[in-house]
Each structure stands twice: as structure tokens, then as C-alpha cells.
Image (tube, grey):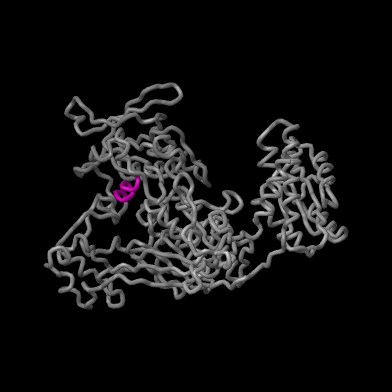
């Protein structure tokens, strides 16, 4: 066995560590430990001089183990592993001790911080003694990409990748791509027509030679690993042959049945055979099976009779499509908070209390009123109140800010002023205009005569008294600073509802093996340094499924994820983590506990041998199987029993 020669390096991290820990004392202590050849402290070990110091010592002193005591391994473990490799060491000869987050940042007691730092360094020294070199493997990257969700985030990412001549499968569960953005009338702060800027991109997606659009489809299963994923996608039956359909619209015109339109947020109606909106991509209708007279009663089939192309197919069935891809981008978007849960706002009780998205459909020229802002009875409102933070910044529902509400409320105010002579009231707790040119837009609305009323709305009630007030609503709000109560009369109340994670986000997270935050949105690898990647290599999250954001931020994030995907495709191969589990088949009893517990589906049962086996390409080294194995047949490489016990003993001595 070769002599173990360890180098220990203590980082000051500016004053982050040195302000609490006596790094010189820790360095001196480290030099007294078994097998430690050199111990140094330096202001910034992650800097180029710090890295050069380690590399030089490895070569000149013959070090074969390296420890850096500094910050979290999430920050700089890859940096120091690379330094070791460049100096000729296996990357798994390195060990990191976290004396910042686990030590200096959690106490102001200098003596105790120094004592703990010494214990953490000793634990690392004892552990690294048992480290063994592991083989780094590479696998090829499939150049195809799967994008889940066809809103602006999915569209942007798809076009970025497809324009680089790489195949994209774009899956959208609705009959058309476009997401929430296509429902909007104008976009803030420039007041561009939302459809005008989005439909060209939608058309590009629909006709792009490198994009296979799978609309009215859902991902049901994903297996594999970065560079080599397999996905099963259910393409739901439209009961319309996409190849034959010409998009003439005659079937919709002749259909005698109408139901409430989801696209118009319940304010209008659509036919039972329908395309959600005129610019839909693909421009192929869908038969709503639940409301179709033929499927429910065996009668009608008017659409079939009038379809000259013969595209109606009542016998059509769902199809399962299997695709192989190297990367996956998740762009599943958001849903809005249901204000009927918060009964004080009167949503669902009063006809003219509506949500921000419903107001968008009222304003839109393709909406149920042809773009006219009007009450349920068709009259023009004399006054409109826009109430902020419905479900946002509220400990009873969501404590986070939804980011876009203030700005779309301002946009709505401008549209009301532009189209009517109504009085406009903004009832808010705080106005947050954080983006580029957003403050200018706010000042513009102030000059346009919008009334800003600071207060948290207590209730929305119906007006009583004079005949002229019948049908009006009274909004009662209390200023959180001085408890002053204000009552605002309005004919229409627009509720700025919170952005929420999708209802099926948990199911999607399970299918894709990604995590969610406490607020329900998908969890990124690092909120600042890696905001689009997930802990599952090769899977990225973009847009509002990762957290509330506006259109510019969504587009930027989608482009960032596309760049990450293209970088992997260009590289052509990807490293697979070597710190995986391995099963000693002679000890394995075939109980299959590990197979059932593995969160990555990396363990399979070999029938003829009656033992389990690990697919190391799928294994993420989480250690669940090793901890659960009753036979002690599973070893987690780089986290062996010897290594863990030595580390525990070191920290307790």
C-alpha cells in the first residue's frame, strides 16, 4: 500500500471565515495530524494563486490526498477537483471541509468556531485517508431534445435549439401552443400586442423542419440519464385527422353545440369541436369528447357530414409515442390562484368581480366582447377597482410576491383609461416596479389620473341605498401603516391573482425525478449560480414553473437553458458520476428492497440469478440502497463504511 501524503489548505474566505475562525491556529493544528505533509492557510484558496499553490505542492511534495477547508462543496468542489486532476491526481483523492456555512457563519463565538473548524479538518483528514481513485466514464449525448410545455418559454427554447439544426420534440398538453401569453391583450411596459409578437414565433414552431410538435399530448414516463433519456408521450385523440384537415373551420361553424370556453376564462363560449383561438398552432380542431352529443348519446355527427376533406374520425384513439433524447427542458408554466377560496373578495358571488386573466380576455379583440370593457349586463363601468396581491404576500395562501401583478394592474389601468371614461382605482399594499422601464410606466399612469389607494382589502360587498348605486360594489381597505379604513365604490373589481405552480406539478416532478420547493415550484440546482439546471443532470427548468417571472425574464431563462443544452450537444459526450453504488452479488439475497426504494430506477432484478444489479449510468450515488440493504451487499463508492466511520470518529475526538 502506498504511503498516504496529505496536504491541508485552510481558506480565510476574506473575512467570511477568518473573521470568526483563527485560521492560523487551525492550519497549525492540521499540520500535527497523521499523514499530513503540509498545512497552509491562504486568503482565497479558490483564487488562481491559491489553486497554483495546491498544484505546486502536489508535484513538489508528492501529495496524493488533498483537503481544502473553506466553503460549501456546492461552490468550489469542482474547482479543486480540477486542480488535483491537472496535477496528476484522481479527482476523488480530494476532500472538502465546510468551515464557512457549517462553522463561521453559524456562531459569533471565536473560540468555539475555531474548535469546530479543527474538528471538521480532523474528520476530513481521517476520511481522505481511505479515499480510493474512481474511474471517470463518459457517455455520448443524443442530440435530440425534449421540451415539455409550449408557452413562450418552451417556444423560445425550441427555436433556439432547432435553429442550430438539432431535433426538438415540443410537447404541449393543450390543443395549441401559446400558453398564457397568447391569452393576453397587451404586454407591459411597451404595450405591444401580445399576439402580434408571439404568433410569428408560434408559426415558426409549427413549420420548423427541426421541431416535431406534439400538441394535445402529455409525457407519461421518462427513464434514462443525461445524454440518453427515453420518454413515452401520450398523443391524445383529437378525432380529427391532422393530415387531412385543411383548417377551413366549417366543422366548427356547423356544430350545433356550445360549452363554456376555457381559453376565454369562462366569459365566452366555444363549439364542442373547436380550435381554442383563431391563430392556433396547429390549426386543427379537437372534438371535446365529454360534451360531444355523438360520444354521449350516439347522435349528431354534423361535423363529419359537412367536412369535405373527410378529416373527422370518431374511431381515432390515443397513441403512445416513444422518443430518445439527450436533454429535457421543463417549461410547464403556471396556473393562477383561485380567488373564490378567499371569500372576502366576492369572486364567484358578484358577477362583476373578475380576475386579471379574465380582464385580459375582455380587452382582447378576439375575446368574448370583441375587446369592449363592459359589465355582465353589457354596460360600460363608471369605475373600476384593481386589487393587488390576491393570494400573494399572504401568509394564509402564498407568502411570495408574484412579481407581475403590479405591472399588469398598471397596464389594465391604462387600457381602461384608453377605452372608457371610467374612474380607475389601484388598491395596493406596495407597488413593485422592478424591471427595465417599469418605473417610467408607473409614472405614466400617475399622470393619466389613476387613483392609488394604499390598503389591504378587508372585503368586497354590494352597495346598498340609492337606486343609482344598485349593482355597484364597495371595496373596504385598511392601510397597514396607520389602520385608516377607506371605502372605494366600483362597478367592476379586477383581482390580481397570484401565480401558482401547476396543479399536476407533483406528478410531473415524479415522472422527471426533479424536486420542488416548499412553494410548489420546481427547484433549481442553485438560485444564483445555476438557476436553470436541476439536481437531475440533463433536465432544466425554465419560465414560471421555476418561479413567478415576467415575459422578458422567461425568454432569457429559456435561452439560457437552450445554451446549456447546445453546449452539451456540441461537446458530444458527458461524464457520468463515478461515486455510485455497487452490489456484491454473492452477498445479495434478492430481497429487492433496494430496487423498490431507488428513486432513480437504477436497480433491476436479474431473474435467472435472483440478485439485484445497479445500472451505474442511472445511479446518482444517493446511498438509499446501501443504507437499506439488510445483507450489507451494497457499497456506495466514495461513501464506504470505512470512510464514513473514520469521518465520524475524527469529528468526535
Q: Nearer the viewer, residue 392 or 45?
A: 45
Q: Nearer the viewer, residue 596 or 255?
A: 596
244 in the magenta segment: no
Residue for point 87% across, 58% down? 61
Residue 279 visible here: no
Establish if 330 lies above or below 208: above
- Residue 179 pos. (x, y %): 38, 57
Establish if 543 lies above or below 1: above
Quarter of the figure that contains the N terminus: bottom right
Quarter of the figure that contains the C terminus: top right
Establish if 386 lies above or below 89: above
362 in the magenta segment: yes
Residue interval drawn in magenta: 356-363
Give the image quarter of residue 397.
top left
- Residue 118 pos. (x, y %): 76, 41
Give the image quarter of residue 568.
bottom right
Give the image quarter of residue 367.
bottom left
Residue for point 48% across, 74% down? 608
Establish if 155 lies above or below 399: below
Q: How many marks?
A: 0
- Residue 21 pos. (x, y %): 75, 37
Q: Main secondary structure of the magenta part?
A: helix
- For this orientation, the residue located farthest to the right is 60
Residue 240 visible here: yes
- Residue 537 pos. (x, y %): 56, 61
Left or right of 547, for residue 355: left
Residue for point 65% across, 56% down? 640
Left or right of 503, for residue 563: right
Amino acid at each position: 500500500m502506498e504511503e498516504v501524503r496529505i496536504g491541508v489548505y485552510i481558506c480565510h474566505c476574506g473575512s467570511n471565515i477568518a473573521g470568526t475562525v483563527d485560521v492560523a491556529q487551525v492550519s497549525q493544528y492540521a499540520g500535527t495530524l497523521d499523514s499530513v505533509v503540509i498545512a497552509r492557510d491562504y486568503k482565497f484558496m479558490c483564487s488562481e494563486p491559491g489553486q497554483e499553490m495546491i498544484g505546486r505542492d502536489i508535484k513538489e511534495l508528492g501529495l496524493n490526498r488533498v483537503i481544502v477547508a473553506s466553503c460549501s462543496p456546492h461552490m468550489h468542489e469542482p474547482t479543486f477537483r480540477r486542480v488535483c486532476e491537472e496535477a496528476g491526481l484522481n479527482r476523488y483523492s480530494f476532500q472538502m471541509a465546510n468551515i464557512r456555512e457549517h462553522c463561521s457563519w453559524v456562531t459569533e463565538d471565536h473560540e468555539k468556531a475555531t474548535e469546530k473548524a479543527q474538528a471538521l479538518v480532523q474528520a476530513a483528514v481521517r476520511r481522505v485517508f481511505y479515499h480510493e481513485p474512481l474511474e471517470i466514464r463518459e457517455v455520448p449525448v443524443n442530440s435530440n431534445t425534449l421540451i415539455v410545455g409550449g408557452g413562450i418559454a418552451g417556444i423560445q427554447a425550441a427555436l433556439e435549439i432547432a435553429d442550430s439544426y438539432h431535433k426538438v420534440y415540443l410537447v404541449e398538453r393543450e390543443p395549441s401552443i401559446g400558453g398564457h401569453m397568447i391569452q393576453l391583450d397587451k404586454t407591459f411596459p411597451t404595450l405591444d400586442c401580445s399576439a402580434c409578437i408571439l404568433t410569428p414565433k408560434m408559426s415558426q414552431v409549427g413549420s420548423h423542419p427541426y421541431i416535431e410538435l406534439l400538441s394535445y399530448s402529455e409525457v407519461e414516463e421518462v427513464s434514462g440519464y443525461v445524454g440518453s433519456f427515453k420518454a413515452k408521450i401520450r398523443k391524445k385523440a383529437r378525432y380529427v385527422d391532422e393530415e387531412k384537415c385543411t383548417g377551413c373551420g366549417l366543422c366548427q361553424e356547423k356544430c350545433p353545440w356550445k360549452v363554456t370556453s376555457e381559453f376565454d376564462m369562462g366569459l365566452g363560449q366555444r363549439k364542442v369541436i373547436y380550435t381554442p383561438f383563431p391563430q392556433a398552432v396547429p390549426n386543427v380542431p379537437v372534438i371535446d369528447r365529454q360534451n360531444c352529443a355523438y360520444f354521449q348519446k350516439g347522435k349528431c355527427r354534423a361535423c363529419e357530414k359537412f367536412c369535405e376533406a373527410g378529416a373527422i374520425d370518431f374511431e381515432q384513439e390515443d397513441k403512445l409515442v416513444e422518443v430518445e433524447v439527450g436533454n429535457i427542458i421543463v417549461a410547464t408554466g403556471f396556473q393562477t390562484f383561485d380567488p373564490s377560496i378567499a371569500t372576502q373578495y366576492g369572486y364567484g358571488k358578484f358577477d362583476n368581480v373578475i380576475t386579471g386573466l379574465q380582464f385580459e380576455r375582455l380587452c382582447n379583440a378576439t375575446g368574448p366582447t370583441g375587446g369592449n370593457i363592459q359589465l355582465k349586463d353589457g354596460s360600460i363601468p363608471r369605475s373600476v377597482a384593481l386589487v393587488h396581491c390576491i393570494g400573494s404576500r399572504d401568509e394564509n395562501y402564498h407568502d411570495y410576491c408574484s412579481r407581475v401583478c403590479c405591472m399588469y394592474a398598471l397596464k389594465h389601468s391604462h387600457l381602461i383609461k384608453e377605452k372608457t371614461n371610467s374612474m380607475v382605482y389601484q388598491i395596493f399594499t406596495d407597488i413593485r416596479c422592478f424591471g427595465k422601464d417599469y418605473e417610467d410606466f408607473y409614472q405614466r399612469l400617475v399622470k393619466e389620473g389613476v387613483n392609488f389607494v394604499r390598503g389591504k382589502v378587508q372585503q368586497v360587498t354590494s352597495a346598498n341605498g340609492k337606486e343609482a348605486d344598485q349593482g355597484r360594489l364597495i371595496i373596504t381597505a385598511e392601510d397597514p401603516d396607520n389602520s385608516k379604513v377607506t371605502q372605494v365604490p366600483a362597478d367592476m373589481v379586477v383581482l390580481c391573482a397570484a401565480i401558482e405552480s401547476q396543479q399536476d406539478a407533483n406528478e410531473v416532478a415524479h415522472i422527471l425525478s426533479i424536486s420542488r420547493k416548499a412553494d410548489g415550484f420546481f427547484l433549481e440546482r442553485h438560485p444564483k449560480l445555476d438557476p436553470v439546471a436541476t439536481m437531475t443532470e440533463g433536465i432544466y427548468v425554465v419560465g414560471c414553473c421555476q418561479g413567478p417571472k415576467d415575459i422578458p425574464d422567461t425568454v432569457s431563462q429559456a435561452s439560457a437553458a437552450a445554451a446549456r443544452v447546445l453546449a452539451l450537444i456540441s461537446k458530444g459526450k458527458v461524464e457520468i458520476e463515478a461515486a455510485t453504488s455497487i452490489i456484491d452479488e454473492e452477498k445479495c439475497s434478492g430481497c429487492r428492497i433496494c430496487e423498490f426504494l431507488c428513486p432513480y430506477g437504477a436497480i433491476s432484478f436479474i431473474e435467472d440469478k435472483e440478485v439485484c444489479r445497479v445500472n451505474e449510468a442511472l445511479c446518482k450515488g444517493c446511498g438509499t440502497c446501501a443504507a437499506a440493504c439488510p445483507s450489507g451487499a451494497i457499497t456506495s463508492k466514495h461513501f464506504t463504511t470505512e470512510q464514513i466511520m473514520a469521518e465520524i470518529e475524527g469529528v468526535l475526538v
